[in-house]
Image (cartoon, rainbow, N blue to C red):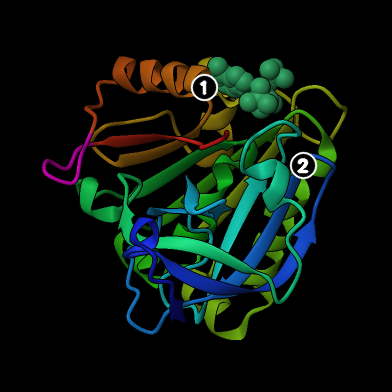
Amino acid sequence: MDVVTPKALRGVASLKVGAVRHWTDKTFSFTCERPASFRFRSGEFVMIGLLDGEKPLLRAYSIASPSWDDTLEFYSIKVQDGPLTSRLQHLEAGDHILMRPKPVGTLVHDALLPGKRLFLFSTGTGIAPFASVIRDPETYEKFDQVILTHTCRERGELDYGLELVAGIRSNELLSEIVGDKLTHIPTTTREKSAQMGRMTDWIRDGRLAAATGGPLNPETDRVMICGSMDMLQDHKALCDAAGMTEGANSEPGHFVIEKAFVD
Ligand code: A2P
């Protein structure tokens, strides 16, 4: 890690990019080196970005890699006129990105009360923090059942999650830790696929309960939600209706929410 020194860049690390992968015309992921002293809790986000003239242009990004990993991984949307992602999408191996190494966020175990089932509801790039959480052994120490739902408009957008879960299943160490505790429910809403529909509809009409062994129950279930503002509000309303209370780092609860960051 090189620490760049001009005033505006104090406390900002410059990290070498490893692999870059373009998943669809709307999404890409990349890895970068992890500073040896950088610690975070799975599910947290950091500010990352590029230099814009003399100043850093930083945006919040969930860390998609688990906290035990040597490298950091990010999963991003491409916004053609977005100030950062319009440039970030052209990253290549060997380039450098900037990161303010101060991880924060609420999609963490510390913000949830103990429970039996953990539901991770995501849409689009909102799957990123859960890519971290479902590869963290702590998740399986704390919960008997972990249900990751990922809803996207089109089938191709599900590939990141499908490969992620296939990677867990084929990893000798992780697959042993995860066992049969992880259920992945990918759905599409605008292109035909094996499972279709918004997860909010699945919750309302009982499809999720049928797939997971019962409806949301504050006694046993904990929920993390990541997606657009509308998606968060609608999922939150369903958690509220189930009698759940929102948690925070300072006061753990039944569910936690965080916006999937875009620019
Ligand atoms: P839909 O196609 O029915 O709008 P977006 O790109 O707009 O963020 O949407 C990503 C995915 O999230 C889409 O599949 C979309 O379904 C779904 N979605 C959007 N808004 C909500 C919501 N309020 N509740 C649940 N799912 C949503």
Residue 109 sits in quarter: bottom left
Q: Picture coordinates of residue 170 (x, y %)?
A: 69, 76
Highlighted magenta segment, given as a residue range: 247-253
Crowd band around label 1 with a 10 angstrom C-alpha radius: few (<14), some (14–19), many (20+): many
Asked if residue 201 can be seen in this view, the reply is no
- Could you say which disc has been placed on residue 157 in the image? 2
Residue that carries the numbered disc 1 in the rendered image: 231
Q: Picture coordinates of residue 232 (x, y %)?
A: 45, 24
Label 1 near ligand 1 (CB < 8 Å):
yes
Q: CA distance from mark 2 to mark 1?
A: 17 Å
Residue 16 against residue 261 in the figure, above or below: below
Q: How many numbered discs, if any?
A: 2
Q: Nearer the viewer, residue 262 or 202?
A: 262
Q: Nearer the viewer, residue 121 or 144?
A: 121
Regarding mark 2 in the picture, which secondary structure is present there? helix
Which kind of residue does numbered mark 2 sit on? Glu
Asked if residue 137 can be seen in this view, the reply is yes
Residue appearing at x 30%, y 18% in the figure: 240
Q: Give the side of residue 110 with respect to residue 237, left or right.
A: left
Residue appearing at x 32%, y 81% in the figure: 37
Q: Give the side of residue 58 with respect to residue 19, left or right.
A: left
Regarding mark 1 in the picture, which secondary structure is present there? helix
Q: Earlier in the sequence, mark 2 or mark 1?
A: 2
Residue appearing at x 43%, y 69% in the figure: 13
